[in-house]
Amino acid sequence: MSSPYFDDHSFDLVAAQAELRAFRLVLNNNLNLGEREHVLANFDKWPQLCSLFGTFHPRVNRANLVKREFKVGAHFIADLAVRKDGTDNVCLVEFEPAKPNDIFAARLQGRKIPPWASAMEKGFSQIVDWAWAIDSYRETPDFQDAFGGKRPNVMGVLVVGRSTSLSDNTRKDRWAWRSQFSKFDGLQGVVLQTYDELFEWFDIQLKDFAGQTTPTASTGQASAPQVQS
């Protein structure tokens, strides 16, 4: 049974496969992804893929509670939240755009390696603020109702950029290190994903769920949902 903070969700493998094909079309047809026109507009239409964000949390997997524009404390909004009903296991998601320099800045600014880009830092700062809000508002009744408890198990996910931005081993290692070792009170961990990595992760999950190869756009039985491309 859902709470007033979430919408109930039932996982449908065939629908999820169709949404994944639509996601692939967006990635194939757009080198750059705008946050609103290509990401938020489409994930509004992809509830099955939204539920799959629960697979980043070891205690959620396929979430059966989903909410877009989820309030975190009094001041912050997550683009997406998913939760396992009857638990305090929650995954919060922040989407940022995907342009060539949205993970690492184009200018070296006197450095030998590029600094993190503003889009990356903006999204990461949002996750830091969620951690602060979780720690600050956990005593309030609204917080406990929304998160399922006073000390919820919350995972943060930031999706930003394309994998082409990780063009050398140093960039790849910095990306992986920041995801693996960023820890905050209030969060179980932080997962960083490019949109290409996200597609690959979802594809793996659906293949596991199906026990076979995910149908391609040409052989699948379900038609792909409309996308904002």
Image (cartoon, helix red, strand yellow):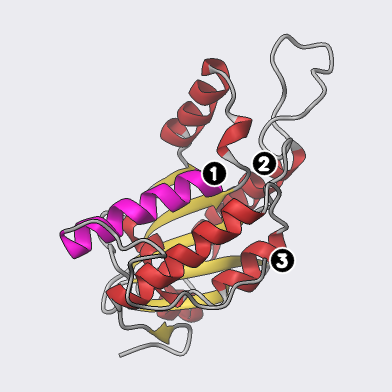
The three-letter code of the residue at mark 1 reads Thr
**Residue at left 42%, top 81%?**
145
Q: As drawn, is 124 to the left or to the right of 178? A: right
Residue on which the image places disc 3: 36
Residue 171 sits in quarter: top right
Residue 207: give x, y in percent of width and height. Answer: 25, 57
Locate the N terminus by quadrant.
bottom left
Q: Nearer the viewer, mark 1 or mark 2?
A: 1
Task: Give the structural element (helix, strand or loop) at label 3.
Answer: helix
The amino acid marked with disc number 3 is: Arg
Q: Which residue is mark 2?
A: 120
* Amino acid marked by disc 2: Met
Query: Taking 7 as reference, is 122 left or right?
Result: right
For the point 37% across and 56% down, the residue is 202
Q: Residues within 10 Å of mark 1 (few under 14, many from 20)?
A: many
Q: Residue at x 76, y 11 (%)?
A: 111
Q: Label 1, on which residue?
A: 194
| Residue 209 on the magenta segment | yes
Label 2 or label 3, whichever lies nearer to me, is 3
Disc 2 element: helix
Residue segment shown in magenta:
193-211
Q: Is residue 84 above or below residue 92?
A: below
Local packing at callout 2 (Cα closer than 10 Å; few below 14, some 14-19, many 20+) is many
